[in-house]
Image (spheres, rainbow, N blue to C red):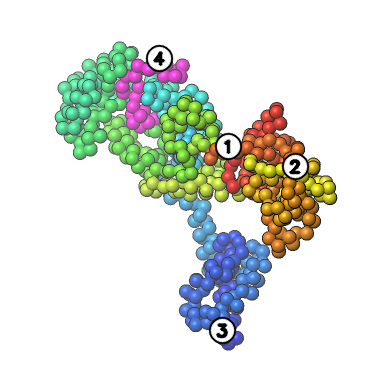
């Protein structure tokens, strides 16, 4: 290899190493750059054997630079590549596609329309995450509208209204307005009357079965042609509660021969005998179906863009008939696929979770095993971590999987800095007596990356407790973290000094430990089942809601300090 070739290789390696390091915000990796290097410079291939020895020192030099110095150097060597990287980076921030026809609206206004029949499961976070992010990106806003018009089969839970609003706030968003559909019955009735006047609806007393048979053979029922005065009178009787459930419905007159039977003369109002749980709405018996109610509300509340599941495409088509009668413009619609969440044994459905709580199999909506927002919140996972992971899934029409590991990775970045370190020895554990020459205090750092936060001061007392899986064989050494090296002699530990070469060069394991006499009994609630153990005494001083890291176990949120010297924490993630 001549000097000229060597210079060229060095320059190319340097560029690739800089690109690699800047792109990942970390050190460059020789292995990762060899492929692109050879691909772009086929003439290097015949020197393949020699290149690693040329590349090594160049990569090491790049890794010795600060992040800013790397950018500066790359700007000198290959400004195009730096620009390209910056463009890719911006792309990462806006993974959501543009909203359709956004430029045609003065202000983007979206809506979150939860059913308050329980707190949210993890999948529900996707809508507020995406809508809230769009509202921010477009400098628009979103409203929350509780679609609580089914007091029977999707019966609202009274406390779920505030709970859901609280969850929206936890995710980091604030709605411009909040509506409850059950407050708006008179508005829906008025629109029904208008629709009847326009000849767009009729009251029908066919049984569901009879109507279904007629509809499926594209035949009108005898009620379709009645005059609208009769329909109006019967609708008022529905409103006044003069019918029982199943006796009468109000249908929207669409196209009885429409090629999609689901769109033929659909039900707009029906009678429900069960009173609504809200006092303000308990007197009503005539309830709108979701398609009528949400269609009217989307228009009246100025919604410009709707996101809904791909399986609900018929909704827009049904509602379009009502919009046509009223001469309204239908909002823009984005249909997306379903989101599934891995890592939970419990099915992600509000009714399933509710049943498991009622049967006592789960402790409540915030049981660590429940795939709910209250649960991840109690475990100390920040709303932002969940939102970022949801937004990354985009809005495609195919089904997507949310990996909780990506939520955990986001959260780790958010909390690692603030989480003080503690030792936590899980059961089963074993106790060992310390030899007299052991130091009388241990001083592990509060946080390994923040020396300024000082050290913990643990009085080991005369005995320490270590996890059974960490116990060394008799005669072997072990390094008690922040304390020193010890050699096991039966049920005693003899002090073996504080020379760290034992760990670095002689393969002695570093383990966590607690003083057996003063450790604090700690219950760690965990999605795979609760874990009991003992934490170092300092954990008693941690405040509820504080995030801690149990070394070699994982991050946890301190839930409460019990009066009987027990601390309860919720496991977040590793
Ligand atoms: Zn009929």
Q: Which residue is rendered at x = 26% and y = 17% of the image?
A: 247
- Depth check, mark 3 against mark 2: the one in front is 2
Of 69 and 571, nearer the camera is 571
The tally of labels here is 4
How far apart, in angstroms, are the residues tagged by discs 3 and 2? 63 Å
Element class at badge 1: loop
Q: Are marks 3 and 2 in contact (CB under 8 Å)?
A: no
Is residue 167 a member of the stretch shown in magenta?
no
Q: Which residues are magenta?
A: 269-297
- x then y, percent, for residue 5: 56, 84
How far apart, in angstroms, are the residues tagged by discs 1 and 2? 22 Å
Number of other residues with Cα within 10 Å of mark 2, as a class: few under 14, some 14 to 19, many 20 or more:
many
Number of other residues with Cα within 10 Å of mark 3, as a class: few under 14, some 14 to 19, many 20 or more:
few
- Depth check, mark 4 against mark 1: the one in front is 1
Q: Are marks 4 and 1 in contact (CB under 8 Å)?
A: no
How far apart, in angstroms, are the residues tagged by discs 3 and 4? 88 Å
* Residue occupied by mark 3: 5
Q: Are marks 1 and 2 in contact (CB under 8 Å)?
A: no
- x then y, percent, for residue 524: 61, 37
* Residue occupied by mark 1: 530
């Amino acid at each position: 290899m001549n000097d000229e070739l060597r210079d060229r290789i060095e320059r190319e390696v340097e560029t690739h190493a800089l690109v690699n390091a800047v792109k990942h915000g970390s050190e460059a990796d020789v292995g990762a750059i060899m492929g692109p290097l050879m691909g772009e410079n086929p003439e290097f291939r015949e020197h393949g054997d020699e290149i690693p020895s040329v590349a090594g020192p160049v990569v090491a030099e790049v890794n010795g630079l600060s992040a800013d110095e790397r950018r500066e150097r790359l700007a000198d060597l290959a400004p195009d590549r730096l620009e390209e990287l910056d463009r890719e980076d911006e792309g990462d921030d806006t993974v959501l596609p543009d909203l359709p026809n956004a430029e045609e609206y003065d202000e983007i206004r979206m809506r979150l329309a939860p059913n308050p029949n329980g707190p949210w499961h993890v999948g529900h976070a996707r809508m507020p995450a995406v809508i809230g992010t769009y509202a921010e990106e477009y400098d628009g806003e979103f409203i929350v509208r509780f679609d609580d018009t089914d007091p029977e089969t999707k019966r609202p839970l009274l406390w779920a209204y505030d709970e859901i609003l609280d969850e929206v706030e936890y995710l980091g968003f604030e709605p411009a307005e909040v509506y409850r559909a059950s407050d708006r019955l008179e508005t829906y009735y008025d629109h029904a009357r208008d629709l009847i006047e326009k000849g767009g609806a009729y009251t029908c007393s066919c049984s569901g079965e009879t109507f279904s048979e007629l509809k499926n053979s594209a035949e009108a029922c005898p009620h379709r042609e009645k005059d609208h005065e009769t329909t109006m009178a019967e609708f008022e009787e529905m409103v006044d509660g003069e019918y029982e459930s199943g006796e009468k419905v109000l249908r929207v007159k669409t196209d009885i021969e429409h090629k999609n039977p689901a769109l033929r003369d659909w039900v707009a109002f029906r009678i429900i005998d069960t009173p609504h749980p809200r006092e303000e709405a308990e007197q009503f018996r005539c309830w709108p179906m979701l398609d009528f109610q949400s269609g009217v509300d989307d228009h009246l509340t100025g919604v410009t863009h709707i996101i809904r599941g791909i399986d609900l495409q018929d909704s827009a088509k049904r509602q379009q008939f009502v919009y046509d009668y009223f001469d309204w413009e239908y909002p823009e619609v984005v249909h997306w696929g379903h989101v599934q969440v891995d890592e939970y044994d419990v099915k992600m459905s509000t009714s399933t979770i509710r049943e498991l709580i009622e049967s006592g199999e789960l402790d409540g909506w915030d049981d660590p095993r429940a795939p709910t927002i209250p649960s991840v919140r109690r475990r100390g996972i920040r709303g932002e971590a969940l939102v970022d992971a949801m937004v990354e899934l985009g809005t495609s029409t195919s089904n997507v999987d949310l990996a909780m590991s990506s939520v955990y990775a986001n959260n780790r970045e958010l909390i690692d800095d603030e989480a003080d370190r503690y030792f936590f020895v899980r059961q089963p554990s074993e106790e060992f007596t310390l030899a007299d020459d052991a130091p009388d205090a241990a001083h592990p750092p509060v946080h390994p990356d923040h020396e300024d936060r000082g050290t913990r001061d643990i009085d080991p007392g005369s005995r320490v407790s270590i996890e059974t899986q960490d116990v060394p064989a008799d005669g072997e050494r072990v390094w008690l973290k922040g304390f020193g090296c010890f050699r096991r002699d039966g049920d005693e530990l003899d002090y073996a000094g504080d020379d760290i070469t034992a760990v670095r060069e002689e393969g002695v394991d570093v383990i966590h430990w607690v003083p057996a006499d003063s450790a604090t009994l700690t219950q760690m609630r965990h999605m795979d089942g609760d874990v009991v153990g003992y934490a170092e005494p300092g954990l008693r001083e941690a405040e509820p809601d504080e995030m801690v890291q149990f070394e070699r176990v994982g991050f946890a949120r301190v839930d409460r300090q019990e009066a009987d010297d027990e601390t309860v924490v919720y496991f977040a993630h590793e």
